[in-house]
């Protein structure tokens, strides 16, 4: 493949990736708002849309890796940098690559924040269920025989003889 054709192909992939990351960022921000309202139906819709974007991003990543491999470069960051040095010596695509990296970081941060909210809600629900069912709260400490509390019978050890 000619370097100009490779640059065009890589440019197309970076444009698509940037658009998808922008969509994903908006979806993750929407997911954050939905988590605050506990609207399960809207949450399911945003979750499906988020998964679709993640699948599309994975396909683009695979195409980029294939492009690197087709030109004898490794499928990692160093390989991508080598490919770009070969097909885009003027650095025209560098700003698109940086934009994608910045968007990906914002998406990761939003996703992490949403994950913290979901984990906190799950813990709260587990605590309420334990209260309603009379189950003891799960403990990550070890019992007298060296097992974690989840591996022992329900109940408390009040002492040992």
Image (cartoon, grey):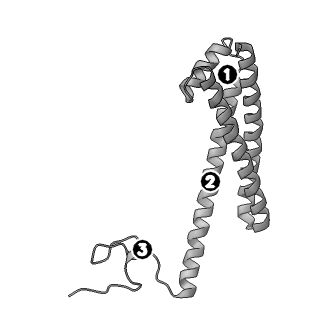
Q: Is residue 118 above or below residue 76?
A: below
Kind of element beneath mark 1 = helix
Chain-order first, disc 1 or disc 2: 1
Number of on-image labels: 3
Q: Which residue is mark 2?
A: 113
Q: On the image, which quarter does residue 98 sit in?
A: top right
Circle 1: is it few (<14), some (14-19), or many (20+) Cα within 10 Å? some
Q: Which residue is mark 1?
A: 94
Mark toward the viewer: 1 or 2: 1
- Residue 123: give x, y in percent of width and height: 56, 70
The residue sitting at 58% across, 80% down in the picture is: 128
Residue 61's label in the rendered image is none
* Residue contact at pointers 1 and 3, CB within 8 angstroms: no
Using the numbered discs, state the Cα–Cα distance from disc 1 to disc 3 in whole angstroms. 50 Å
The residue sitting at 73% across, 42% down in the picture is: 56
Using the numbered discs, state the Cα–Cα distance from disc 3 to disc 2 in whole angstroms. 25 Å
The residue sitting at 59% across, 21% down in the picture is: 81
* Residue contact at pointers 3 and 2, CB within 8 angstroms: no
Kind of element beneath mark 2 = helix
- Residue 95: give x, y in percent of width and height: 70, 23
Mark toward the viewer: 3 or 2: 3
Kind of element beneath mark 3 = loop
- Residue 133: give x, y in percent of width and height: 55, 87
- Residue 158: give x, y in percent of width and height: 31, 87
Residue 139's label in the rendered image is 3
Q: On the image, which quarter does residue 34 sit in?
A: bottom right
Circle 3: is it few (<14), some (14-19), or many (20+) Cα within 10 Å? few
Using the numbered discs, state the Cα–Cα distance from disc 1 to disc 2 in whole angstroms. 29 Å
């Amino acid at each position: 493949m000619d370097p100009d054709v490779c640059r065009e192909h890589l440019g197309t992939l970076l444009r698509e990736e940037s658009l998808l990351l922008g969509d994903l960022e908006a979806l993750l921000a929407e997911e954050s708002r939905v988590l605050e309202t506990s609207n399960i139906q809207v949450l399911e819709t945003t979750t499906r849309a988020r998964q679709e974007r993640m699948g599309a991003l994975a396909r683009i990543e695979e195409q980029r890796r294939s492009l690197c491999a087709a030109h004898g470069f490794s499928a990692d960051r160093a390989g991508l940098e080598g490919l770009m040095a070969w097909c885009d010596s003027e650095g025209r695509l560098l700003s698109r690559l940086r934009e994608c990296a910045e968007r990906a970081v914002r998406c990761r941060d939003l996703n992490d924040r949403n994950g913290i909210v979901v984990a906190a809600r799950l813990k709260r629900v587990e605590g309420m269920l334990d209260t309603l069912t009379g189950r003891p709260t799960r403990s990550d400490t070890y019992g007298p025989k060296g097992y974690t509390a989840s591996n022992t019978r329900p109940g408390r050890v009040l002492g040992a003889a």
